[in-house]
Image (cartoon, helix red, strand yellow):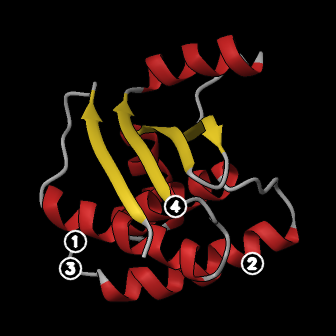
Amino acid sequence: MIEKQIEFIFRHPRTLSKKRQWLKMVENVVDFFSENNLITSRLVRLNVVFVDKREIAQLNEKYRNKPEATDVLSFLYEKNRDLLEGELIIALDIVKDNASADKIPWSKELLKNIIHGLLHLAGYQHGPEMFAWQDKILTLYHDQFKEIN
């Protein structure tokens, strides 16, 4: 079994209710990544940082030269067989807006962003394989955690 150190950091006025359930879900998703060899490190150290549109736009411009807000950014700090360390930056207000636009529960949109960011940390780039994994994991885990809202 993979060791996990996962922390949620809130730099956004909005917080998550049911934080403990969300942490459990992220741990389960990391276990899935490990069981399917998407992550092969022994320890995953992950910060999930929740920010607003303004902050994620600033980070997106600084690190990707894209002067607009986005929903999720992934930062990989270290990846080897012993440790995968990274950070996901998620704009909760954009997640809510995207969920409303797509007429889906915001919990599903948030989970999609977490999975998407983890796939990038695991080394995947946008393409059919990445999106197939994303859809598979999203379906599996959203069905298990529908009550988190």
Label 4, secondary structure: give it.
Answer: loop
Q: Mark 3 sits on what residue?
A: 147
Label 3, secondary structure: give it.
Answer: loop
| x then y, percent, for residue 6 | 33, 50
- State which quarter of the image contains the C terminus: bottom left
Q: Quadrant of residue 132?
A: bottom right
Q: Mark 2 sits on what residue?
A: 132
Disc 2 marks a residue whose amino acid type is: Ala
The mark nearer the N terminus, 1 or 4, is: 4
**100 horizontally vs 57: left or right:** left
| x then y, percent, for residue 128 | 86, 71
Which is more toward the observer, 27 or 54? Answer: 27
**78 horizontally vs 110: left or right:** right
Disc 3 marks a residue whose amino acid type is: Glu
Find residue 59 and name its label. none
Alpha carbon separation for disc pair 3 and 2 = 24 Å
**67 horizontally vs 126: left or right:** left
